[in-house]
Image (spheres, helix red, strand yellow):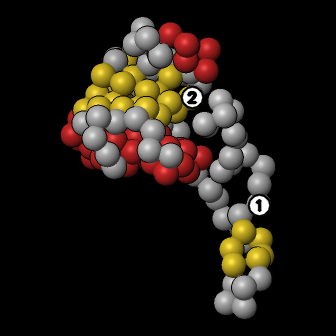
């Protein structure tokens, strides 16, 4: 990051590896959640912002239903309440919201934006996406 490079790491096509008792590395059958990994990496580099890119422009309640409602801004307490109410799908938005909570709770003044790749440039200025704050 200090040299103005963005390194793509922690996901996408790799094989999970562990170190056994004897110090040898071996591949294992596992799933590495990209959203939680991104939050952990952002935490390690002491980032203030984390962008989580997804196919939709904003997080929604009642997704895919006639009463679907997009969320522009969401606090951690609201996010936890929406999770408890079952608003987010396990294999879709739920891990993104959980990763956002983990990241925001891990430091002061941290923010997460969830939006689409196509709208990421607009989300940087607050013009789209869902902003998740403490």
* Rendered location of residue 35, percent (x, y): 53, 44
Identify the residue under disc 1: 15
Q: Residue at x 29, y 35 (%)?
A: 109
Where is residue 79? Give x, y as percent: 29, 38
Residue 64 visible at all = no
Which quadrant of the structure image shows residue 63? top left
Q: Is residue 18 rendered to the left or right of residue 77?
A: right
**Numbered-mark total:** 2
Depth order, front residue of 13/69: 13
The answer to which quarter of the image holds residue 61 is top left
Q: Is residue 39 above or below residue 130?
A: below
Closer to the chain start, of discs 1 and 2, is 1
What x and y, as percent, mark residue 20?
69, 84
Q: Quadrant of the N terminus?
A: top right
The residue sitting at 50% across, 46% down in the picture is 45
Report the Cα–Cα distance between label 1 and label 2.
Answer: 23 Å
Left or right placement of residue 125 versus residue 104 in this view: right
Q: Which mark is residue 23?
A: none
Residue assigned mark 2: 54
Looking at the image, which is closer to me, 83 or 134? Answer: 134
Q: Residue at x 62, y 56 (%)?
A: 32
In this orientation, which residue lies closer to the viewer: 108 or 122? 108
Q: Quick one: quadrant of the C terminus?
A: top left
Question: In the rendered image, is residue 67 in sight?
Answer: yes
Q: Work out whether 94 lies above or below 116.
A: below
């Amino acid at each position: 990051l200090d040299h103005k490079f963005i390194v793509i790491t922690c996901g996408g096509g790799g094989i999970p590896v562990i170190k056994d008792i004897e110090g040898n590395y071996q591949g294992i059958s596992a799933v590495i959640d990209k959203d939680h990994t991104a939050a952990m990496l952002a935490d390690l580099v002491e980032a203030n912002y984390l962008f989580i890119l997804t196919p939709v422009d904003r997080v929604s309640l009642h997704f895919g239903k006639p009463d679907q409602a997009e969320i522009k801004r969401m606090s951690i307490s609201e996010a936890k309440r929406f999770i408890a109410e079952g608003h987010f799908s396990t294999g879709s938005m739920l891990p993104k919201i959980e990763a956002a909570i983990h990241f925001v709770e891990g430091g002061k003044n941290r923010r997460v934006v969830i939006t689409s790749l196509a709208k990421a440039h607009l989300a940087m200025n607050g013009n789209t996406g869902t902003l998740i704050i403490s």
